[in-house]
Every structure is written in C-alpha cells, then in structure tokens.
Image (spheres, rainbow, N blue to C red):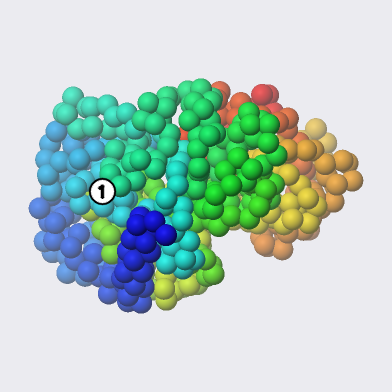
C-alpha cells in the first residue's frame, strides 16, 4: 500500500467521524450557522437595510428578509462589482462565479474568503466518506480527470477576478493532487468543447485513469470518443484501474444503462450537489438513499413547499420543521452574502436524521400547460423504468407540451435521442409504459387524460447528436451546461426538431 493511499484512509476515517457527529445534531449545526451569519451580516449594507440588529430569531429573520432571486439582489451585486466593500458580506469577495441563464444576462455570484472552504472541503469530504465506507482508496494513487470549465480567470475593472466555479476551484487544487490531476491547465483552458475533448483524449488515453468526474452527458461524449479513438470495446479495457465515477448536476439514472455498456463493468459512483451559490449536499453513503446536506459550512437553509412558491406570502421553513417526501423550493443564506436567495432548485427529504435529500427539479423547469405541474423527478423515473424494462438506450430527452397538434387533443411530447431507435413495437410499448408511470406519479396528469383534456404522450425520436447540436447552437456545448429536461413552452422542443 502506497503512503498516499494509507494517509487517505486515515484522514477519511477521522473526517467521516466528524461528519457523522455533526449530522446527528443537524438543528444545532444550522442554528450555529444562522447566528454566525447574522453576526457578520449586521456589519453590511444589506444587514443595515434589513434591520439585522433587531433580529433575535428565525421568526424575526423571515419578517425582515424577503425571498429573492438574482435579479432582486442585483443592485447590491453591482455595487460590489464596482469595488464597494461591506455590501452583502464584510469586505470584498475573492472572486465572482460567472454563470449564465437569467433574464438579465450573466449572473455574478460572490465567492468570499469565508465561503470558499465550503466548495473545496465539501468536494473533498464526499470522496473521504466514500473511502471510509468502501475501503477503496486505491484511486488516489492513479490519475484523476475532472471535465469542467476553463480555469482561466478575467478581472472586473474593480480588480475582482471572475470565471466559472469549476475554473476557480481548479486554481485551488492542493499540491498533493496536482501531479495526479488531468487534463493540463492549457487543455482545460480551451473554450471550444469539441477541440477540448480531442485534446483531453490525447492526454488521457495512455494514462492510468482511476477517477473520472463530470456531468454525465459530457462524460458520455468523452467515453464514446475514447472508445472510437482507441478501437477498444469499453472504457474498462482502456482504463483497467478506473474504479470511481463522481458526478453532479443531473440525475444519473437515465444515463446509467448507457454508462454500464460504455464502461463494460460496474464502477462505484458518488453523487454531489455543487452550485455557484454553495456546495449543498453530497452522497455520504453507498447504502443509504439521498445526499447529506452540508450543515456546518456557512449555509443556512430555508425550504418553501413548491406548490406555495409563487404565493404572495409562501410558508418558509427551517430544517427543524421540514417533512419527508414533500417537494420544497430551496432557499439559501450564505457566508458569500446571499440572503433569502432562491437557488431555483426543488428537493425532497428522504431522511430527516441525518438530513438527506434528493434533487427533484427546477422551480421554473416544469411542464404545466394545463395545471399538471410535471417535474423532472417524475419524467426521469418514468424514463429510467422504460430503459430498464425495454432495453432502451437513451442519450438525452426533453419533454414539452404540444398545444396545437395537427389532429386530436393536445399532448406531452417527449423528444428522445436514442443510441439505437427501437422498432415500432418497442417504441409503442415503451411509450405506453412511460405514460402509465406518469399517470401513477402525477394525479393531475391522470385526471387530464381521463377527462379528455389531454391525449396520452407521444415519443418523437431524434437523430443522434441532436442535443449536442442544440447546445452548440445556443453557445452552451460542454462544461457544466445542461439541457433542461422540461419545458413549459416549445422554445427548446421546436429548436431540437428543426436541428
């Protein structure tokens, strides 16, 4: 056993013990974070504007601090970008994470000296929990690849650096991992995704890759290109010591069957839930369902029942009052200076002690043209079952309403890119299975079918490469970008069909 592997196992045992101790008293951990956030927040412009000096409890906090999205916080952000100190958090942020996807253009999420450890340590802790549970630390002795955005950073006129979160994190990889990490800084800095994948393959194809990390859709492209280039049958033949796949950002289940075929043998997986706004949760167990909330790392969580989110005065709950199996919109208060910030995701608790969650979708990504409010968790579960039962090989899919069909009632259209398009009989059996699963999961959808408001869903097979072509057409190919699984209109669907 190498020294690095031995040290990793010792450190994993110690760290996992600390994490379990915190998780056993989650309300206490969250209260401590809440008090610390208030203490430092009182010194800021936001804290003064919102009467932090008069806040003595979470109940007080809810009356003083509204739930906001990025646009509603952007005036404060703009002041920080100009170099003003003590606006949302004491001092100036170390970085801004630049992300896309808001109505006002790019988002600039502050990353402070206090919040940076949340991102770095949580990613590390996810791996340490895996090592402690599985006993497998051998991967630390091999090469590791993280498919991510460019680590190159630009600077605002105020001097504050900005870039993608994964790029910022790449600049803080500890020295003991630098020799193991691929691809090179130069290759990681390539912006064009297709060129970048070619260069990554150049650098990795002859290496002893043991850990691979990234968003499943882009890792799948990397795997397919590797196999084609190497002329071998599987990733296991190319990387015989590959033993751990780390992913985040999307539900892995719809990809699992395809990955099993590409890899050629089972490998362990670790799921993480990182966001520019904070590292929220990670898989701490190989046997228990769900992701453990990061409880003591500068984030105080709030939860709004998702069916109340758009109410004028929705219910806001702390961790102390949540329930199992309820869909909640997630709200963050962080030591990066985000206050009452709706991250846009929905989650549900699968365990309360310790608090473990599943990500169920996006509060604005749903299909509800007729009040059915179909969410990502429902469509992913239905598709996963069809893949399992009928051997479907699906690369990607998107669900949108078809309000004006050529004939018949409106319906939900599932645009599916298959690795191999099933024959007519297989397609029809899978379609019927998915529709049955959707009716079983969503009573509103079932009522619309039985009430002759909707007809049963239809499958639209797409040519291979359709989703990549779509992402390329909107300038979001590769990196941390994801195709929305659901649309409440046909903006994505019509573009997919056209491409």
Residue appearing at x 12%, y 44% in the figure: 91
The answer to whether residue 12 is left or right of residue 449 is left
Q: Is residue 467 visible?
A: no
Residue density around tag 1, few if under 14, some if 14–19, many if 20 or more, within 10 Å: many
**Vertically, is 166 above or below 465?**
below
> Which quadrant would residue 16 be assigned to in this image?
bottom left
Q: Position of residue 45 (x, y in %)?
A: 13, 47
Image label count: 1
Farthest residue to the front: give it: 1
Quarter of the C terminus within the rendering: top right
Q: Position of residue 157 (x, y in %)?
A: 18, 24
> Which quadrant would residue 372 be assigned to in this image?
bottom right
Q: Secondary structure at mark 1?
A: helix
Q: Position of residue 417 (x, y in %)?
A: 70, 37
Nearer to us in this view, 272 or 179: 179
The answer to whether residue 286 is left or right of residue 419 is left
Nearer to us in this view, 295 or 5: 5
The answer to whether residue 294 is left or right of residue 48 is right
> Which quadrant would residue 99 be assigned to in this image?
top left
Residue appearing at x 85%, y 51% in the figure: 429
Q: Position of residue 138 (x, y in %)?
A: 46, 56
Residue appearing at x 10%, y 53% in the figure: 43
The answer to whether residue 157 is left or right of residue 201 is left
Q: Is residue 256 visible?
A: yes
Badge 1 is on which residue? 116
Quarter of the N terminus within the rendering: bottom left
**Vertically, is 383 above or below 286?**
above
**Vertically, is 388 above or below 192?**
below
**Vertically, is 471 above or below 485?**
above
């Amino acid at each position: 056993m190498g020294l690095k592997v031995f040290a990793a196992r010792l450190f994993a045992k110690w760290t996992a013990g600390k994490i379990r101790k915190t998780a056993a008293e989650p309300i206490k951990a969250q209260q401590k974070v809440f008090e610390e956030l208030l203490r430092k927040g009182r010194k800021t412009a936001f804290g003064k504007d919102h009467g932090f000096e008069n806040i003595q409890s979470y109940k007080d906090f809810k009356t003083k601090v509204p739930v906001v999205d990025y646009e509603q916080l952007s005036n404060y952000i703009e002041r920080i970008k100009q170099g003003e100190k003590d606006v949302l958090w004491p001092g100036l942020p170390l970085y801004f994470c630049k992300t896309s996807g808001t109505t006002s253009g790019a988002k600039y999420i502050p990353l402070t000296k206090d919040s940076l450890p949340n991102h770095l340590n949580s990613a590390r802790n996810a791996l340490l929990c895996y090592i402690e549970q599985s006993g497998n630390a051998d991967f630390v002795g091999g090469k590791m690849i993280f498919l991510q955005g460019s680590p190159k950073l630009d600077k605002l006129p105020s001097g504050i650096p900005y870039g993608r979160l994964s790029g910022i994190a790449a600049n803080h990889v500890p020295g003991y991992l630098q020799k193991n990490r691929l691809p090179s800084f130069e290759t990681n800095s390539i912006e064009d995704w297709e060129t970048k994948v070619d260069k990554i393959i150049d650098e990795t194809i002859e290496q002893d890759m043991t850990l691979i990390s990234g968003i499943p859709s882009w890792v799948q492209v990397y795997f397919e290109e590797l196999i084609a280039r190497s002329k071998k049958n599987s990733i296991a033949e190319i990387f015989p010591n590959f033993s751990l796949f780390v992913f985040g950002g999307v539900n892995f289940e719809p990809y699992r069957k395809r990955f099993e075929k590409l890899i050629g043998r089972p490998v362990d997986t670790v799921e993480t839930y990182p966001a520019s706004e904070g590292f929220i949760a990670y898989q701490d167990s190989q046997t228990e369902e769900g992701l453990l909330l990061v409880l003591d790392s500068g984030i105080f969580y709030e939860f709004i029942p998702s069916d109340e989110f758009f109410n004028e005065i929705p219910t806001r709950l702390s961790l102390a009052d949540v329930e199992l199996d309820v869909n909640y919109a997630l709200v963050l208060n962080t030591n990066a200076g985000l206050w009452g910030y709706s991250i846009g995701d929905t989650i549900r608790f699968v365990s309360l002690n310790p608090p473990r969650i599943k990500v169920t979708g996006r509060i604005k990504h749903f299909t509800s043209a007729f009040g059915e409010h179909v969410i990502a968790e429902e469509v992913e579960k239905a598709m996963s079952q069809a893949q399992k039962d009928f051997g479907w090989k699906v690369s990607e899919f998107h669900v949108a309403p078809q309000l004006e069909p050529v004939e018949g009632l409106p319906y939900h259209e599932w645009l599916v890119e298959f690795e191999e398009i099933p024959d007519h009989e297989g397609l029809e059996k899978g379609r019927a299975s998915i529709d049955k699963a959707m009716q079983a999961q969503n009573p509103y959808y079932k009522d619309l079918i039985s009430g002759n408001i909707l007809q049963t869903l239809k499958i639209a097979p797409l040519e291979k490469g359709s989703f990549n072509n779509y992402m390329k057409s909107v300038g979001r190919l590769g990196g941390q970008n994801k195709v929305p699984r659901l649309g409440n209109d046909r903006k994505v669907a019509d573009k997919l069909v056209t491409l």
